[in-house]
Amino acid sequence: MRLDKFLKVSRIIKRRTVAKEIADKGRIQVNDRVAKSSTDVAVGDTLTIGFGNKTLVVRVDELVDTTKKNDAESMYTVIDQQSSPN
C-alpha cells in the first residue's frame, strides 16, 4: 500500500493530499529512510512522522483498503511520541 494512502486510511493524517505534501517534503521516514508519498509500506515497517513541533513513531500492524473510524487504530501501534520544546 502507498504511504500516503496508509496514513489517510489509518487516520494518522486526515487527508491524503496533506499526507502526500508532508511525505514529499521529506518529513516521513520508513525504516529510517526518507520516504516519498509513493513508497510502499508493509506490515512491520516503522514510520517516523515529523509534524510541526512533534514527532510520531508508529509500527504498521495491518493493511486494509478501507476502515471504519473505530477500527483505524488497529492498523498501527504508537511506539514513541515526542513534542519538541518551544
Image (cartoon, rainbow, N blue to C red):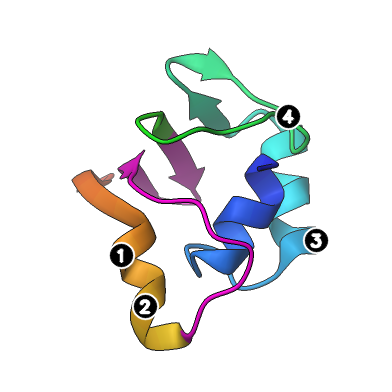
Looking at the image, can residue 86 be seen? no
Question: Of the residues under marks 3 and 1, which one precedes in the sequence?
Answer: 3
Question: Of the residues under marks 4 and 2, which one precedes in the sequence?
Answer: 4
Residue pointed to by mark 1: 74
Marks 1 and 4 sit apart, C-alpha to C-alpha, by 24 Å
Residue pointed to by mark 3: 17
Q: Residue at x 63, y 63 (%)?
A: 65
Residue 35 % position (x, y): 64, 25
> Image height check: is 61 above or below 46?
below
Q: Which mark is residue 71?
A: 2
Residue 83 % position (x, y): 26, 50
Marks 4 and 2 sit apart, C-alpha to C-alpha, by 26 Å
Q: Amino acid at mark 3?
A: Thr
Q: Residue at x 40, y 29 (%)?
A: 45
Question: Of the residues under marks 2 and 3, which one precedes in the sequence?
Answer: 3
Q: Amino acid at mark 2?
A: Asp
Name the element at disc 2: helix
Marks 2 and 3 sit apart, C-alpha to C-alpha, by 22 Å
Judged by depth in the image, the label closer to the viewer, 2 or 3, is 2
Marks 4 and 3 sit apart, C-alpha to C-alpha, by 13 Å
> Image height check: is 7 above or below 28?
below
Disc 4 crowd rating (10 Å Cα; few below 14, some 14-19, many 20+) is many
Asked whether the residues under the numbered discs 3 and 1 touch, taking CB atoms below 8 Å apart as contact, a structural biologist would say: no
User: Is 44 in the magenta?
Assistant: no
Residue pointed to by mark 4: 36
Q: Which residues are magenta?
A: 48-68
Judged by depth in the image, the label closer to the viewer, 3 or 1, is 1
